[in-house]
Amino acid sequence: MSSTYRILCLNHDPAIVIDRDWSSPNDAMAAATDPGHAGLDDHLRCDLLVGRWSGGLCEIGCPPSIGPEAKCSSHHRNEHWVDLDWLRLLAAALDSSEPAVTAAVKELTSPYHCWRRERVQRLRSVL
């Protein structure tokens, strides 16, 4: 089964899925990085992620965070993809008050701050 890609806008709570499909992850990432060029004029200043659907949503990617308009605080030069199951576990772990779980979350997310609490919480409707 081939995949389709859609943009998720995190400026809404919960996040919304923009009703437009891309057939390539590169095209979807380009649209999320430069929404004006992709005709997404309503989302020029929004925090955008890319979702990969193959039957259902299976991965979410954070676009490269370069330039002054970058919304991700990690400042990574390449897109960063994570499995939906991993994000579901992270969402549950972020709500934990158990010190060992809190330490594990910090260690897992420290290389990429893409998945800070606010962003993950806004994804709850698609998780």
Image (cartoon, rainbow, N blue to C red):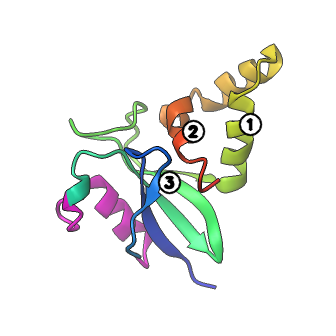
Q: Is residue 24 left or right of residue 104?
A: left
Answer above or below: position of 34 versus 70.
Answer: below
- In the rendered image, which quarter is residue 69 located in? top left
Q: Residue at x 55, y 77 (%)?
A: 3
Q: Earlier in the sequence, mark 1 or mark 3?
A: 3
- Residue 122: horizontal and vertical position, in percent? 52, 43
Answer above or below: position of 80 versus 114.
Answer: below
Q: Are marks 3 and 2 in contact (CB under 8 Å)?
A: no
Q: Which mark is residue 61?
A: 3
Q: Earlier in the sequence, mark 3 or mark 2?
A: 3
Which residue appears farthest toward the front when viewing the image?
13
- Amino acid type shown at disc 1: Ala
Q: What is the spatial separation of the Cα atoms under label 1 and label 3, in whole angstroms?
A: 19 Å
Q: Secondary structure at mark 1?
A: helix
- Amino acid type shown at disc 3: Gly
Q: Give the magenta part as a residue range.
A: 22-41
Q: What is the spatial separation of the Cα atoms under label 3 and label 2, in whole angstroms?
A: 16 Å
In the image, 8 versus 28, the foreground residue is: 8
Is 68 a magenta residue?
Answer: no
Which residue appears farthest toward the top when viewing the image?
99
Q: Secondary structure at mark 3?
A: strand
In the image, 77 versus 71, the foreground residue is: 71
Q: State the residue position of label 2.
A: 121
Q: State the residue position of label 1.
A: 92
